[in-house]
Amino acid sequence: MDVHKISELFNQDLVVINIGLESFAENLKKEGVRVLKLNWKPPAGGDKKLASLLKRLGR
Amino acid sequence: MVERDKANQEAASRILAGKPTLIDISTAGEVVPGMNKNVILHAGPPVAWERMCGPMRGAVIGGLILEGMAKNREDAQELAASGDILFEPCHHHSTVGPMAGVVTRSMPVWVIENKTFANRAYCTLNEGLGSVLRYGAFSDGVIARLKWMAEELAPILRTALQRHGGIDMKNLIAQALQMGDEGHNRNRAGTSLFIRELAPHLVMLDDNKERISKVLSFMHANDHFFLNLSMPSCKCTVEAAAGIEGSSVITTMARNGTDFGIRISGLKDQWFTAPATMVEGLYLPGFSAEDAAPDIGDSVITETAGIGGFAMAAAPAIVKFVGGTPKDAINFTRSMYEITVAENDVYQIPSLDFRGTPTAIDLVKVVETGILPAINTGIAHKEPGIGMVGAGLVKPPIKCFHDALEAFVEKYGD
């Protein structure tokens, strides 16, 4: 592992893409961090029945 | 690539290859397949008289009066309920009808042929806005206008069209999109282009000048005249993609004011329906949401073919008619790329760097993303006999997409 490169990363300003809860992005924004919120939803809005149907189509 | 992807690519390629061409004007009785004397066509999925909404009932009443099968409202209602009239969806007869979509035998129809696949689609001529049959109005004035359309408008236009020769509708629609139309609720450019095509031939006809002037004035006064041309153009284009084994591309979306229905390429003629939803939009003076009928009409064939609501980014001015902001119009189109298989190589949107319109809606993508097809539409009064009250945007009911997915998986899932 290139330790030097990882050290470099920690010395740079953070630029974050958030794919988790929106509150993660909000907290970072309050700290002045540049953050992009990915508009992501689980397939079929998390509906288990529909998700299992989609799985049967190889999705 | 899985089989479904291949089938969907085939469906999309057939849609993109479509060459809708206006070839004639005739009457429904002469050219629409299966148009027997007791048949009345209507918009949307199948619906019996008992379940028809107000505006569709109004249009049926008007249609029966127009055909001389009833003298008045009461006569017509009795006949419609008697079981002697066969009500069938336009879509079962290669036809599309805006709003109530009622088609009777004597009505003139545009004949559009998809030159690539040699299939045809039909649609009546547009009556204008306000108090018109397709919005459920059937006053003496409405019937008189329909008779004039059959006796003067259609024959004069037919003669001019014969002089002109077939008109390439794909070319006209492509031009109209570059000029601020989206082909469903904004057809000002398309109507103007159509007049430009026919005007040199209309003035050369051996006919009374006043009659010809009236034809030109009628088209000029109705920005929606082109809608009844864009709809059958879209219908014969998408119909070529129906019945492809394994394809989850949506080949029909339609509403009858009671139900919203869809059909899927790989599931052939099977309808999946759910209660029609209400339209959110702008109302004409004196009307409000309380007056509105639920979503109605076959005009959503435009969205099914990748224009209309899917091309709203091309038509920022439409928001003055259906509500929202120009930014909303752009976002509607952008989001439709998430649920479609292809981008049109001819229908392009200037404001999106001439990106092709999102084309061939994939049922699986709709369910997976939860993004519903963006549809803009007119709003009819809920009672028969009144007419148009506004226009707006509507979200189709998600249930019919869920039900269709279940049937699709049952047939094609592992």
Image: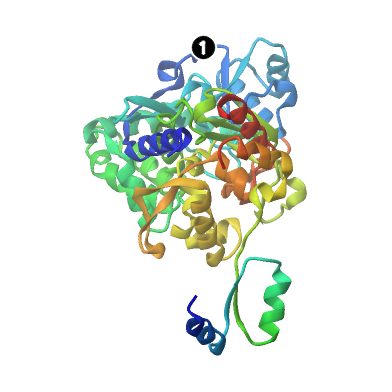
Q: Check disc 1: other Cα within 10 Å, few if <14, some if 14-19, many if 20+.
A: some
Q: Foreground: A15 or B52?
A: A15
Left or right, B181 with reference to B116: right
Compared to B225, does B207 lie above or below?
above
Residue B118 location in percent, x, y?
A: 32, 25
Residue B388 location in percent, x, y?
A: 63, 44
Residue depicted at x 55% and y 60%: B319
Residue tagged 1: B36
Residue depicted at x 68% and y 17%: B80
Left or right, B90 with reference to B241: right
What amino acid does circle 1 point to?
A: Asn
Residue B174 location in percent, x, y?
A: 34, 49
Q: Foreground: B250 or A3?
A: A3
- Residue B391 visible in rendering: no
Split into 4 quadrants, where in the image is the C terminus of chain A?
A: top right
Residue depicted at x 36% and y 44%: B216
- Count every numbered label the image shows and give the total: 1
Compared to B43, does B31 lie above or below?
above
In the rendered image, the residue lying farthest to the front is A1
- Residue B235 visible in rendering: yes
Residue B34 location in percent, x, y?
A: 48, 14
In the rendered image, the residue lying farthest to the right is B290
Of all chains, the one bearing label 1 is B
Left or right, B263 with reference to B109: right
Q: Foreground: A41 or B30?
A: A41
Q: What element carries label 1?
A: loop
